[in-house]
Amino acid sequence: MPALLAGTAYAQAPYGAPQGEMVLVAPNGDLLDYVPERGAVIISRDRLGRTVLIDNFGNVVATEVPAETYFPQVRRNRYPVEYQDAPPTDAWGNEQVTTGTIAPVERQPLDQAFPDDVTQEMTSIEPQSENLPRHDMKPTIAVKTRSRPEITALQVFLDREGMSPGVIDGKMGSNVDKSIAAWQEKTGETLDPNNTDDIIERLRFSGGLAITSYTITPGDAAGPFVAEIPEDYSQKALLPSLAFTSTTEMLAERFHMDEAYLKELNPEADFTIPGTTIKVVNPGEPMTGKVARIVADKGRKQVFAYDEYNTLISAYPASIGSSDTPSPSGLVNVERVALNPGYTYNPKINFQQGANDKVLNIPPGPNGPVGTVWMALSKPTYGIHGTPEPSKIGRTQSHGCIRLTNWDATELAKMVQPGVTVEFVD
């Protein structure tokens, strides 16, 4: 078994394993940390032509796969993009584009014309909606009753492919249906959400199985955290930041999970103790590329990001407007991008929040009114932003803006530059 012996030599050195080397992967997706003795296994082939080790009882012990497919160092980018210098990072290592406060700008009625300078900028932009594929609401194959681990695997696969299902919670819903349909549009293939074996096979070649282990670090447990997030904006303005309230909330957002689901997977875990090993989902690396155009589909409650070749890069569930505060229609463009922004609330030009009748400067943080990202649009006071309540995305309405989960908004923001067009379609 020379190939097998060579492969296991790199089992503990995934980053930098020479191209062409092989590793042994157990049925649960983990690496096999030993080489079976001769006579202990039967060497066979699976339907994909890969070497498979089977024990004397007929059970699969491991499958031989290329190291470079099991340990992808970066997400493969299928889209041409010019190299750009990496953005600066903050004290926690998070990339920064711009930070600052979102200043109030008077919101115009939707039937009022753009200011002259904006109108002049937009005259050269033609609506693209007639040239776009029509987005179906449902996947081609109806989803049957599946277990929560099976649905989690499906959600993680879609998330890794850039077709965000929103929070990963092991439950089917419209956000998952929409992400399956978007994946089929992107790839031209049909995904059978009921074929769990196929989904697990795809996961193994895009970063491993859906559930992985994570050890809580001292930094995770230390925060900083705030005791609670008040509803009233005047009380929010008194806080030093609108940080996470707990380790579970922070980790759930880091791993794109519903916080309740994270706790369900780890019923006995104390998340406040460093060194505690927990189960989390493995959503993979963020998508990369250069977005040239964004389509906000108000009917579907979904946002689509396209490159300059009109190829779909990613799709995200979204909350887009409401009957009281509708989103605009037609074309606008992105004017600026800010990560970790503060927020200035002015009741005279924004929506009415509680009994607040004064201008309030609300500090930044993931639990702020616009989450961790603000992409200002050329229609004054409208933007694409994050949210402190990711589980409600696609299920509730917004104050006219495009609201995404914080992680989806951050991913999109890092592929967007000022001038990118945003088309609202009904």
Image (cartoon, rainbow, N blue to C red):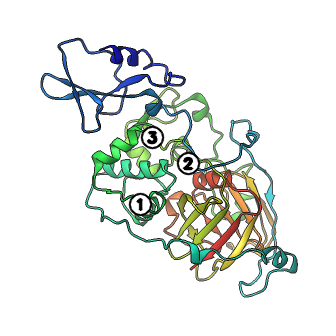
- Can residue 204 be seen? yes
Label 1 crowding class (10 Å Cα cut-off): few <14, some 14-19, many 20+? many
Q: Residue at x 72, y 51 (%)?
A: 339
* 426 over 279 or under it: above or below: below
The kind of secondary structure element at disc 3 is loop
How far apart in space, not on screen, are marks 3 and 2 (Cα)?
Answer: 14 Å
How far apart in space, not on screen, are marks 1 and 3 (Cα)?
Answer: 17 Å
* 206 over 35 or under it: above or below: below
Q: Nearer the viewer, residue 203 or 170?
A: 203
Q: Residue at x 38, y 46 (%)?
A: 264
Q: Nearer the viewer, residue 213 or 334?
A: 334
Judge from the rendering whether residue 293 lies leftward or rightward of residue 20; answer left or right: right
x, y percent for residue 376 = 75, 64
Q: Which residue is mark 1?
A: 180
Amino acid under disc 3: Ser
How far apart in space, not on screen, are marks 2 and 1 (Cα)?
Answer: 19 Å
Mark whose residue sits in front, 3 or 2: 2
Q: Nearer the viewer, residue 214 or 151?
A: 151
Judge from the rendering whether residue 205 lies leftward or rightward of residue 96; answer left or right: left
Label drawn at residue 206: 3
Q: Which residue is mark 2?
A: 78
Label 2 crowding class (10 Å Cα cut-off): few <14, some 14-19, many 20+? few
* 283 over 377 or under it: above or below: above
Amino acid under disc 1: Ile
Amino acid under disc 2: Arg
